[in-house]
Image (spheres, rainbow, N blue to C red):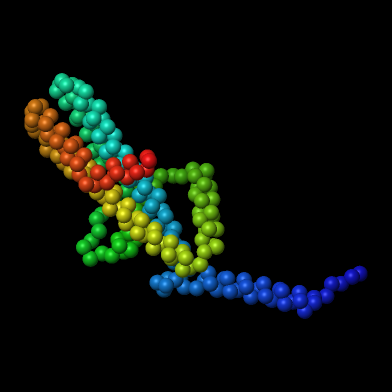
Amino acid sequence: MFIRKNTPTTNFVGKFTQSVRRIVQDVKDEGAPSGMTRDEVIETNERLRSLRLRLEESYDTVKKALINLMNKYGDSKSHRNIFQRYPMLKLMIKEVIRLETQYWTLVDIPRQEKQETVPSYVMRACSIMEKTQKSGEGVKTSARLAEEAAERRERMERLEHMTTAQIEHENTQLINDLYRLLKKYLGLRHLIRVLKEEYGSSKMYPIFPRYTMLKDMIKGIMHDPDYMEVCHETLANSN
């Protein structure tokens, strides 16, 4: 029977490989510049990505609602008769302000405090979203749970090949991106809230003055900087 003996070269290669693995692991485990541990940095990454997913859904919902409002307003101009166009204006506004009563549709994030830093504000938004999600979360199917578990494994595998400092750098970029998205989202939510208040206040007026008021409400949104930014964004994405 032939027994293979370890040669000095084999031992050297084995020790060298182990040494490289230890160095790679040490680099991965090295603390982040902020002083957070690797586990804390990974947890922050998960929280930020969850917020982005939920926030993007809400932002797309309000953006589409306002764009549809403008499209319908433009189409309604073909109706010269005030008695035909008046109910159309009421209906298209109602479709938008209904979002404010459907609390489960949109994530509700407060505005940034005066002295609050960008990272603190974004992480506070994460906490608010997480509490809202837990309280309003329905029963998930086994298929959905399996899908979420698979998605989490993919994210963890990706982070496994990154150093702690690289993950924290990604977190910083996520925070900056989320901050910009939060500002845009809250700007559109404000427009819808104002529209809801103005529409409610207009109910006391008769048809002719109210007809003008409804048109002014929609045109006010059309020329608002927050909505105009959305128009530019949509136009840029379509090109």
User: Which residue is farthest front?
Assistant: 239
Q: Residue at x 28, y 42 (%)?
A: 231
Q: Which of the pair 15/195 is nearer the observer?
A: 15
Q: Using the image, determine if residue 105 lies above or below residue 69.
A: below
Q: For this view, does 163 lie left or right of residue 217? A: right
In this rendering, does residue 9 appear at all?
Answer: yes
* Residue in the picture at 23% in, 61% down: 113
Which of the 4 quarters of the picture holds residue 40?
bottom left
Looking at the figure, which quarter contains the N terminus?
Answer: bottom right
Look at 33% across and 41% down and name the residue there. Answer: 235
Q: Is residue 121 above or below residue 149?
A: below
Residue 230, horizontal then vertical, whole percent: 29, 44
Q: Quadrant of residue 76?
A: top left
Viewer can see residue 95: no
- Is 77 on the left-hand or right-hand side of 35? left
Taking the image as shown, residue 116 lies to the left or right of residue 81, namely right
Residue 107 picture location, percent across and down = 32, 48
Residue 191 placed where, x, y %?
21, 44
**Quarter of the figure that contains the C terminus:** top left
Q: Outermost residue toward the right?
A: 1
Outermost bottom residue: 8
Q: Is residue 74 above or below residue 188?
A: above
Residue at screen point 62% across, 73% down: 20
* Position in image of residue 34 (x %, y %): 40, 72
Of residues 131 and 32, the one drawn nearer to the viewer in this rendering: 32
- The mark total stands at 0
